[in-house]
Amino acid sequence: MLKELIMRASLFLFMIMLFTNYVRAQDQKTNAFSIGINAGSNNNHLRGDSFAEKYDAQYNYFIGLSFEYSINENFSVLTNFNYENRSYKSEYESFNLVWTNTFTVEDKTKIKNLNIPLLLKYKFGFEKEFFINGGLFYNHIFDVSNEMINKETGEDVSDLDFNELFKDKEYGFSLGIGMTFKLNEKNNLALEIRGDYGISDIGDTKFGGISQTKTNTIKFIANWNLNL
């Protein structure tokens, strides 16, 4: 038993050494690390239960940092730390119990979160200018706000704390495609379209049909990065 474990451990270490030597050899051909700044616009959808169905997609923005490690000239590992705003909007008729009349409500929900994807990136083309990436994302939600504006009076008729109705975390799959423009030996500009497909429920209550709400986000990303 001990001999078998030693043999397996030796084989594992040998494979690590081969992989490390391979990576080092490839690193001689490419810059191993790069850091950057990314920003852009996002289009936000909700799907799932009755709460999600009443909201329309809205545009908002995000900004953050990017870190990339090149394994070889084709593959790299990429992550971002993005401050992200997401918003959703709806209009519907509501009923005033005091005056027994109906009025139009403009309902806006906004989510602020830290977005952290972990992606495997594949570069292709004659100069490796095109790329696709895919992997997972994690969102730490730190604020959810809601406004229900009476369009006739301008009054905010919402009295709910939406932070109590939603979870503070979310995760899912991420997939993107884009193109890199080489500015000089050290600097690059990348343009990307990326989709985040949430697989976890963000609702934390059955109130208002929120418990099975999930998100879809389409991002239009501009990223400047510096090869180290």
Image: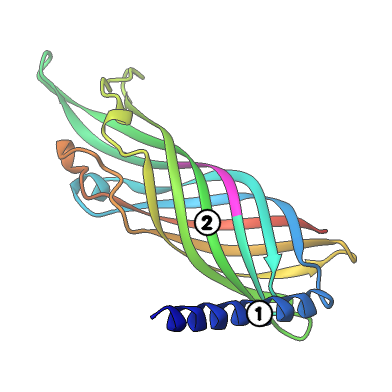
- Can you identify the residue that label 2 sits on? 117
- Quadrant where the image shows the N terminus: bottom left
For residue 139, say whether it is visible: yes
Answer with the quarter of the image where residue 191 lies: bottom right
Label 2 vs 1, first from the N-terminus:
1
- Considering the numbered disc 1 on the image, is that residue within a helix, a strand or a loop? helix
Magenta span main SS: strand
Nearer-the-camera pick, 13 or 209: 13
Q: How far from the left and from the top, in percent, is residue 200?
A: 31, 54
Amino acid carrying mark 2 in the image: Pro
Nearer-the-camera pick, 104 or 174: 174
Range covered by the magenta-colored residues:
80-86
Answer with the quarter of the image where residue 14 lies: bottom right
Question: Which residue is at the far front?
Answer: 2
Classed neighbour count for the residue bearing mark 2: other residues with Cα under 10 Å, few (<14), some (14–19), many (≥20): many
Classed neighbour count for the residue bearing mark 1: other residues with Cα under 10 Å, few (<14), some (14–19), many (≥20): few
Q: Would residue 97 appear left or right of 72 to someone viewing this image?
A: left
Answer with the quarter of the image where residue 164 lies: top left
Q: Which residue is drawn at 28% across and 23% down?
A: 158
Task: Tell me whether circle 2 and circle 1 mark residues in contact (CB < 8 Å).
Answer: no
Q: Would residue 178 appear left or right of 127 to someone viewing this image?
A: left
- Considering the numbered disc 2 on the image, is that residue within a helix, a strand or a loop? strand
- Can you identify the residue that label 1 sits on? 19
Nearer-the-camera pick, 123 or 31: 31
Amino acid carrying mark 1 in the image: Phe
